[in-house]
Amino acid sequence: MTTCSDVATADLDSDLDAYSRRAARSGGRKSPAELLGYTAAATGMAFAGGDAMASVMHMTTPQTFSVGSNSLKNFLFDVDGAGAPDFFFVLGHAFYTGGGTSYGSAFAELGFAAPGRALKGPTFLADLVAGALIGPTGSFGSGPFYSVSTYSGVTSSVRGSFSPSSTGLLGFRFTGATGVPGTQYGWAQIHVAARPGPGGSASLTISEWAFENCGDSIQAGQTSGVGSCDAVSTPAPSPATPLLALLGLGAMGIRRYRERREVGLKRLAESAAPA
């Protein structure tokens, strides 16, 4: 079965052939080094090693972590899908009654057992406004998203900035494994539910999240953008293979094209060589 990547790769090979034929007919033929330079610049995204196509990565598959009545559980969350736990969540619920009184609690918090940390406010983890900058100048840590306790059915303690009455924006820092591996920054839209009474529960839902995998800062709520390590941000000289064609390849097509780049570059060099 022919895929879009196969077609796009074939088109790029055709572009290389066409360009070499034009060069052969040209009276002012360029040197092999100049031709290779044009081609490499035009296809920098495909020729670059590692994850050169780095930018804001946006995920929209909701993730929910929850516990039932009188339960305590730990959860691990992998932000970039690289297989390593980036965040450690702790959720719990407890209810006790006796002697004419009752005590209840429900909470969701970010723990210390994974390297990920959240942007802090003056007292608790910060619930950000859209557009707030998340980056290396921020203060990051762990703590409760939200916790509530009751005594004899009356609320006695509330901690945390993420009220169950609304969703919030959490800024975070983690050790990313894509793009430029290392410290990366992102945000998550979260909702906490906490019912401390009998038969209660606690849950944390991440409805969407995004991170900038060049290690650059990101704005809360930002879902797209080109990072400093993305070759797309460098204009290609002309004549050149269009970068839009490369963008249409997808990950598999880019890998295939990288594997075949040496052949294409060799053809260009040979066509430019004096007869």
Image (cartoon, rainbow, N blue to C red):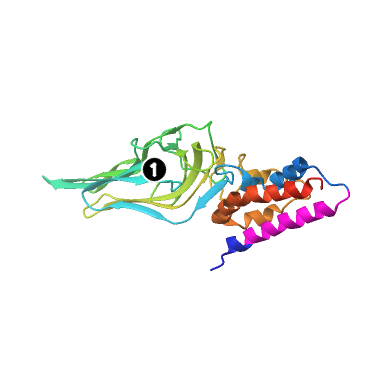
Residue in the picture at 59% in, 46% down: 53
* Rendering coords of residue 4 (x, y %): 59, 63
Would residue 43 appear left or right of 224 to someone viewing this image? right
Residue in the picture at 72% in, 53% down: 241
Say which of 185 and 191 sits in front. 185
Circle 1 sits on which residue? 84
Would residue 29 appear left or right of 190 to someone viewing this image? right
Toward the left, the furthest residue is 99
The three-letter code of the residue at mark 1 reads Ala
Q: Main secondary structure of the magenta part?
A: helix
Q: Quadrant of residue 48?
A: top right
Report helix, strand or loop for mark 1: loop
Is residue 270 shown above or below 136? Answer: below
Residue in the picture at 62% in, 63% down: 7
Is residue 8 shown above or below 164? Answer: below
Say which of 73 and 151 sits in front. 73
Toward the right, the furthest residue is 27
Let me know if residue 26 is in the magenta part.
yes
Toward the front, the furthest residue is 275
Q: Residues within 10 Å of mark 1 (few under 14, many from 20)?
A: some
* Rendering coords of residue 229 (x, y %): 60, 40
* Rendering coords of residue 196 (x, y %): 26, 49
Let me know if residue 42 is in the magenta part.
no
Which residue range is magenta in the image?
8-27
Toward the bottom, the furthest residue is 1
Would residue 167 appear left or right of 180 to someone viewing this image? left
* Rendering coords of residue 19 (x, y %): 76, 54
Q: How many dots with numbers?
A: 1
Say which of 80 and 265 sits in front. 265
Residue in the picture at 81% in, 52% down: 24
